[in-house]
Image: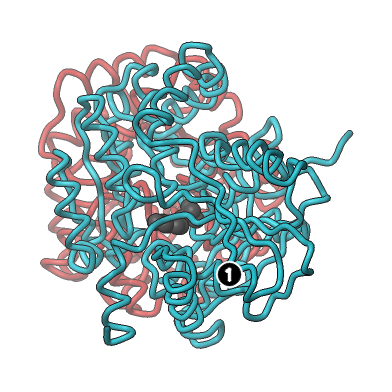
Chain colours: A cyan, B red
Amino acid sequence: MKKTYHVNEKGYYGTFGGAYIPEMLYPNVEELRQKYLDIMYEDSFQKEFKQLLKDYVGRPSPLFYAERLSEKYKTKIYLKREDLNHTGAHKVNNTIGQILMAKRLGKTRIIAETGAGQHGVATATVCALMGMECIVYMGEIDIARQAPNVARMKMLGAEVRAALSGSRTLKDATNEAIRDWISNPVDTHYIIGSVVGPHPYPDMVARFQAVISEEIEWQLQEKEGRSYPDHVIACVGGGSNAAGAFYQYLDDERVNLIAVEAAGKGIHSGESAATSVLGEDGIIHGSRTLLMQTKDGQITEPYSISAGLDYPGVGPMHAHLYASNRAEFISITDDEAMTAGLELSQLEGIIPAIETSHALAIFDTRKFKEDEIVVLNLSGRGDKDLNTYIEYFKL
Amino acid sequence: MNRINQKLQEDKKLLSIYFTAGYPSLNDTVGVLQNLEKSGVDMVEIGLPFSDPLADGPTIQASSTQALENGMTSEILFEQLTDIRKTVSIPLIIMGYLNPMMQYGIEAFCAKCKEVGIDGLIIPDMPVNVYHEQFQAIFEKYGLINVFLITPQTSEERIRFIDSISDGFIYMVSSAGTTGAKSSFGNAQSDYFDRIGNMNLKNPQVVGFGISNRETFTQATSKAKGAIIGSAFIKHLTKHGVDTISDFINEIR
Ligand SMILES: Cc1ncc(COP(=O)(O)O)c(C=O)c1O
């Protein structure tokens, strides 16, 4: 059998993945598992999905040759401009797909979790578009840290509910969303924001995000006369933008995959989110994967200056890419990321999300050959992070 | 014979209590167990606290957070239980999430359970098929009964499958929702209790989630063999402490 890094028929990537869920969730997750592929590949679904990506999200997103950046780092760097999507990041590719899925499953009520608020905004947006009730769970601490996104969600008609349990951040917001789903098993669909959670979520979200690498293929073909780059770089929180950028190349060993995690104040500083280095095999949010935890199996709170990378686990696809050495994993500190964000702003006139700045920061140490083609997934724009940039650089 | 199976043969409705190990204070675990037995409780679920208890409502979440702050770990729980069988003879079940058990090592965890005299496990986030394919042999090697949950949404076919691989009792979750005390049950619950009662399953059923007082206990056990009280008991512990456990139990039956 041909070696593959995609999910297998049981819902696993190597030994990672699966659906470790309480029985209360079984009917919902099982219904989704049985139907998701059939629904996604119906003609009418594909037609509606593509139309919305084009007319509403503004796809295809450009593949931009970053000339000055390339010159500085002596290689050929293309930026995949997910920052130009409606709502400012790749997250909306998934929420468009999942809202259409929810409609076809006959669901009328949408729940979601959010950390920084990007996925919450992307979910509230598609719920407004489709006229669906929307409840977004957000940690009490994040609500205080991310006031502009909370306001956006409210303006879009969503209800933002504070997660008051545990550490009151993203992992707890996810727990609360799951508890809501347990309590509302019939009318509700849970739109997870990354390639995490029980099977089939990681695979479904990856397939919705795969539009990123599908476009890279034809865009590179046009620009370079070949459909694949030598390297694809993406930042990894839960892993959805990376999954989308890697998707078409997962089994194409000509392409080197580079996943960039947040090292926070330093990998061993005790304030980090570098899950591949610090994580151990375990179960989080219904998935077997690598996660940061104590020796006793209690899940710990990660840290990164970027709220979107600050998740104690990583999707099971990425855990497998790491364990099998298919992808290269690099971690970047707060300081390195901030510097790289400022550099891109001034070299190319693009202010990146701080999540994305982590990916950009690898050029300082990870060298590429002059004739190599490097595609970096510019997962989001920096508007939401202006305050953090301003405070950091005393602008 | 396993103490759980023995207890299930007794000709009465069983009252089972859930509490979180290491709560209210780290060293309360043994005292709570002894008082529960003295008060006439039939069976106990000892909650192994977890940082992210997905299936639990606010009361058990808060007690778990407190227990972890008190310093509770799997290791300490087993230390506390080392001599438990010298003073407590009712069936004891550990209820916890899979991740802490995985970090301890599933086989090592099961071996330790047997060593201290634990009779069974309830692991809400362990899927039926994973148990069946990976863990059943280990559980059986150490004489542990695994208890599965069913809910009002569980299909008849699946209930029959769960019945076929169970060898103790089936944990009937009373309604769609996480753990938490309710003061009464409605028609939907009594229909569900009747439906399951009429299925003639080989395993007796014990109802949990939402049982809080004499009324809900009586309703839950109209068809089922027993019922489990968790959140309401934890609330009592929080308010009145370990010494008044019998007052709580006497109000239930
Ligand atoms: C711009 C941006 N990039 C990356 C991420 C990280 O998520 P993921 O790893 O799922 O792509 C986020 C999350 O909020 C984000 O907003």
Local packing at callout 1 (Cα closer than 10 Å; few below 14, some 14-19, many 20+) is many
Question: Can see residue B131?
Answer: no
Residue B61 image-quadrant placement: bottom left
Q: How far across and how far down the image is residue A174, in percent?
A: 35, 51
Vertical placement of B171 versus A85: above or below? above
The chain containing the residue under callout 1 comes to: A
Q: How far across and how far down the image is residue B169, in percent?
A: 47, 34
- Secondary structure at badge 1 equals helix
Camera-side residue: B13 or A133? Answer: A133
The residue under the point 48% across, 69% down is A357
Camera-side residue: A108 or B153? Answer: A108
Question: Can see residue B80?
Answer: yes
Number of numbered markers: 1
Is A250 displayed left or right of A207 in the figure?
Answer: right
The residue under the point 16% across, 66% down is B238
The residue under the point 31% across, 22% down is A107
The single residue placed furthest to the right in the displayed view is A1
Vertical placement of A209 versus A239: above or below? above
The residue under the point 67% across, 67% down is A329
> Which amino acid type is shown beneath numbered disc 1?
Leu
Camera-side residue: A8 or A68? Answer: A68
Q: How far across and how far down the image is residue B21, in percent?
A: 37, 66
Kindly tell me whether mark 1's CB lies below 8 Å from ligand 1: no
**Residue named by callout 1:** A69
Is B77 displayed left or right of B66 in the figure?
Answer: right
